[in-house]
Image (cartoon, rainbow, N blue to C red):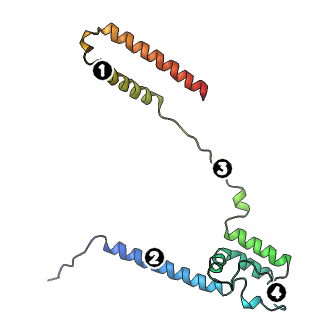
Amino acid sequence: MYAETQHTPGRAPARRAIRKATVVIAVLALLLLATAGCAPGNERWASVDNKANFWAGLWHGLIVVVAFVVSLFTDTVGIYESNNVGWGYNLGFLLGASAALGGGIKASHRRKRKVVVRGPDPELLARRVERGVREGLRRAFADRAETFTDDEWTELGRRIEERLGEELRDLDKEA
């Protein structure tokens, strides 16, 4: 009755990702073109009578990153308009640039998280060291293992434990 369609897994998400990337690139290109038209250095501000004011400074501060990228490829766009009204433009530019670059009031009130570095669990570390020492001793004394009595093995273990304790205390004093 109905023909079954073959569905290839993984192709639909890949197509969606390509479409999404294309839309993002197109929006960024439009944003770049839109902001470059009113960026500092534009002929709009070339007239002595038409000076950039507070609102132009605010806008130029907001698009400072885009203007910088564009200024890398052309000499007609800058990141700051030199033909301005003075402190009003400078204030607007400062406010816009701080908003665009992530500065502002909230940035100074962020809580700083303490980074706590924890070492390995001492019990786990002790078990690993003990296991490693036992295996090392068994390999080292493989040919004479049968000749050692249980008391001799216990005494050897006590001496090693004592020596390791001294080494660990020395490490604690150094740190």
The residue singled out by tag 1 in the image is 138
SS assignment at label 3: loop
Measured in 3D between alpha carbons, the distance from the residue under mark 3 to the one under mark 2, in whole angstroms, is 35 Å
Q: CA distance from mark 2 to mark 1?
A: 61 Å
Which callout, 2 or 1, points to the residue nearer the camera? 1
Q: How many neighbours does mark 2 have within 10 angstroms: few (below 14), some (14-19), or many (20 or more)? A: few
Please tell me the numbered disc located at residue 51. 4
> Which sits earlier in the primary sequence, circle 1 or circle 4?
4
Which residue is rendered at x = 71% and y = 55% of the image? 109
- CB-based contact (under 8 Å), mark 4 and mark 2: no
Looking at the rendered structure, the kind of residue marked 4 is Lys
Which circle's residue, 3 or 2, is located before the other in the chain? 2
Q: Which label sits in the foreground, 1 or 4?
A: 1
Across and down, in percent, residue 125 comes to 44, 29
Query: Which amino acid type is marked by label 3?
Result: Lys
Which residue is painted at 70% across and 69% down in the image? 99
Quarter of the picture containing the N terminus is bottom left
| Label 4: which secondary element | loop
State the residue position of label 3.
112
Gap between marks 4 and 2, in whole Å? 39 Å
Q: Position of residue 153 (x, y in %)?
A: 34, 12
Residue in view at x 69 percent, y 75 percent:
62
Please give the name of the residue rendered at 39% of the width and 76% of the height, measured from the top-left corner: 16
Percent position (x, y) of residue 161?
A: 44, 17
Does the CB distance between marks 2 and 1 fall below 8 Å?
no
Q: What x and y, as percent, mark residue 20? A: 45, 77
Instruction: Classify mark 1: helix, strand or loop.
Output: helix
Q: Which residue is mark 2?
A: 21
Q: Is residue 40 left or right of residue 165?
A: right
